[in-house]
Amino acid sequence: MYLVETVSKKQHVSTVKATPFDPAATADRFSVAGRVAGFRIEQYGEIDGFPLIALTKRAPGQRPRIYISAGMHGDEPAPPLTLLTLLETGFFDERATWFICPILNPTGLVRGTRENATGLDLNRDFFDIQAAETRAHICWLQRQPPFHLTLCIHEDWESTGYYLYELNPHQRPSLAEPILAAVRAFCPIDESPVIDGRTTAAPGIIRPIDDPLLRETWPEAIYLRAHHTTISYTLESPSAFPLESRITAHRAAITSATMRLIHDLSKSSAYPPPSPP
């Protein structure tokens, strides 16, 4: 075993953590499993021959609208594989209306780099839009209704445990603690007082500045908060852990967040649509 330096973070990581990823084959698996599960499969763009796909499944009646994204960074394979596992095991049923963008950065994923093939970090590209992937993604988002919940699934090479970012400007009932409680059974929580350069609000919980007008760059979560939702979570698994452990932790987090939201909305009125910044 030897060590390599990641493109995105000046830190050495074991090559045993690197995971070969075929975006085209994975998109095919999403398409096949999605159709079996009753999803509509839409190709909203194409990058270097790789499809950009979205899966939507609208449930009858009044159901929460939940958006989940993955594959934003090419050195983070667990998020798209987590969503594929959930899809293939029938998790996305009629308890909610689902909107899934599972492979946002295929050229990064095939290379194993955080950035896309042109060297852009797509998760810093939602304000001064430069990448074709971001432009196509936003065009797709603009055609969707407001979401009751958005989940952006990520990994962190530097983390010692699982953690999350919460954007909750209207002070809805927080899902942060239930998410981490569910994850704790499978993965330790990062309890560092400072994570990714930010002071935590509680162990494993970062509540950053959520006013889009106060942010110089917009990651996907800030764009979603500005235009599409009133509550959003970015979920981060520790990349140094085995792939299956990261997938299991993300499954627990996604299950906890979505089921708690569905339960809460069944007992109260739906969250209002997001307000403009």
Image (cartoon, rainbow, N blue to C red):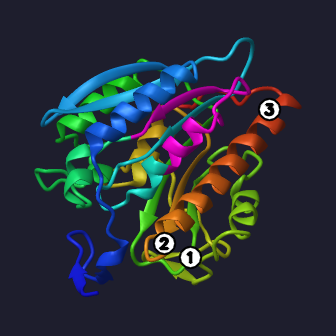
Above/below status of 100 relative to 211: above
Return the disc, 2 or 3, that comes first in the chain's sequence: 2
Q: Position of residue 91 (x, y in %)?
A: 66, 37
Per the image, is 33 magenta?
A: no
- The residue singled out by tag 3 in the image is 265
- The residue singled out by tag 1 in the image is 161
Residue 44 visible in the snapshot: yes
Instruction: Label 2, secondary structure: give it.
Output: loop
Q: How many marks?
A: 3
Return the disc, 3 or 1, that comes first in the chain's sequence: 1
Residue 276 visible in the snapshot: no
Q: Give the range drawn in magenta.
A: 82-102
Foreground mark, 1 or 2, reads 2
Q: Mark 1: which amino acid?
A: Gly
Q: How far is disc 2 from disc 3 in space, using C-alphas?
A: 35 Å
Q: Where is residue 86 in the image (x, y as percent from the top left)?
A: 58, 42
| Quadrant in which the N terminus is drawn | bottom left
Q: Residue at x 57, y 18 (%)?
A: 38
For this rendering, which residue is in front, 180 or 14?
14
- The residue singled out by tag 2 in the image is 242
Q: Mark 3: which amino acid?
A: Leu
Instruction: Label 1, secondary structure: give it.
Output: loop
Q: How far is disc 3 from disc 1 in space, using C-alphas?
A: 30 Å
